[in-house]
Image (tube, grey):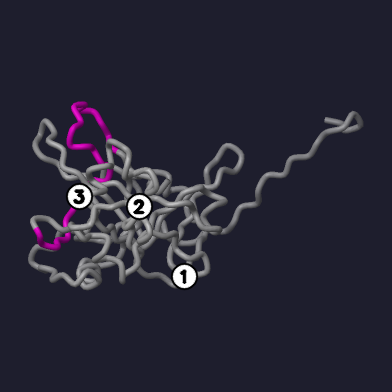
């Protein structure tokens, strides 16, 4: 599962990556660096809307257009392999695909009763581009565009922490993934991949990441590895 990401890259850099212009007088989406982005918050996506490429802010947590539950919080992730057949994702996968720029994501290691967060990113830094699908739900307050990040089986770096990781779309495949004329899963799924393990790095970070209200550069600073607790089998001759 990918449930926390970082987006510290500037809006102009993201626009350049996708071949878009960026209006500095209207800096949204991505008006500031964000170090601990959580579900239900807005994230930038690149999509094709009305035949035109655009960079837009969407709420993270896809709510299907047909949803009637006003308390639905949305689907943060969708398995790429099953998304084409699942009711919540079937239409978005066919007609409403998008790209989600990010420069890192967090996963957690369970140690005893605590969860230790780790940052995963490209070796040396740089942007990932995740595959996403979006939908438009008419909420009681009005129309709302929402997005889910697709996932694939984790590579060997991520696997000890979680069995899934974000599906990556390489730069040469952006146009093919967004192509509104292509709706066949057998053509689209091969465009997605787990990022190569040899081109990634990870390190432990502050427990403050566990709170979605924390958001500052110090969250990405490496902290010392804490030793894992050792467990020893007691014998009849051990004295308390």
Q: Is residue 101 above or below residue 235?
A: below
Question: Label 2 to label 1, Cα distance in Å?
Answer: 19 Å
Q: Earlier in the sequence, mark 2 or mark 3?
A: 2
Q: Which residue is mark 3?
A: 95
Near-viewer residue (98 or 118): 98
Furthest residue toward right: 237
Image: 148 above or below 192: above
Tell whether label 3 touches label 1 (CB within 8 Å): no
Which residue appears at 31% of the width and 63% of the height?
Answer: 8
Residue 162 lies in the magenta stretch: no
How many residues crowd around disc 3 within 10 Å: few (fewer than 14), some, or many (20 or more)? some
Residue 204 seen in the figure = no
Residue 49 rendering spot, x and y as whole percentages:
12, 55
Looking at the image, is mark 1 or mark 3 nearer the viewer? 3
- Region in magenta: 51-74
Q: Which mark is residue 123?
A: 1
> Does the magenta portion include 72?
yes
Residue ID for mark 2: 36
User: Circle 2: is it few (<14), some (14-19), or many (20+) Cα within 10 Å?
Assistant: many
189 with respect to 138 (left or right) = right
């Amino acid at each position: 599962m990918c449930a926390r990401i970082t987006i510290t890259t500037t809006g102009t850099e993201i626009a350049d990556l996708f071949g878009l212009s960026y209006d500095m007088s209207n800096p949204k989406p991505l008006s500031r660096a964000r170090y601990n982005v959580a579900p239900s918050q807005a994230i930038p996506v690149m999509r094709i809307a009305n035949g035109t490429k655009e960079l837009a802010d969407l709420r993270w947590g896809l709510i299907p257009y047909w949803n009637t539950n006003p308390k639905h919080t949305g689907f943060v992730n969708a398995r790429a392999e099953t998304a084409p057949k699942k009711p919540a994702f079937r239409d978005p996968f066919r007609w409403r695909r998008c790209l989600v720029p990010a420069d890192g994501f967090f996963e957690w290691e369970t140690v005893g009763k605590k969860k230790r967060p780790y940052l995963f990113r490209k070796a040396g830094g740089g942007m990932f581009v995740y595959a996403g699908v979006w939908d438009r739900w008419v909420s009681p307050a009005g129309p709302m565009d929402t997005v889910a990040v697709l996932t694939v089986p984790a590579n060997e770096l991520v696997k000890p922490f979680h069995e899934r990781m974000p599906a990556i779309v390489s730069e040469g495949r952006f146009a093919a993934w967004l192509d509104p004329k292509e709706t066949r899963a057998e053509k689209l799924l091969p465009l997605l991949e787990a990022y190569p393990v040899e081109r990634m790095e990870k390190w432990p970070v502050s427990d403050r990441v566990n709170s979605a209200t924390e958001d500052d550069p110090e969250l990405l600073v490496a902290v010392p590895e804490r030793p894992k607790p050792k467990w020893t089998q007691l014998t009849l001759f051990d004295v308390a």
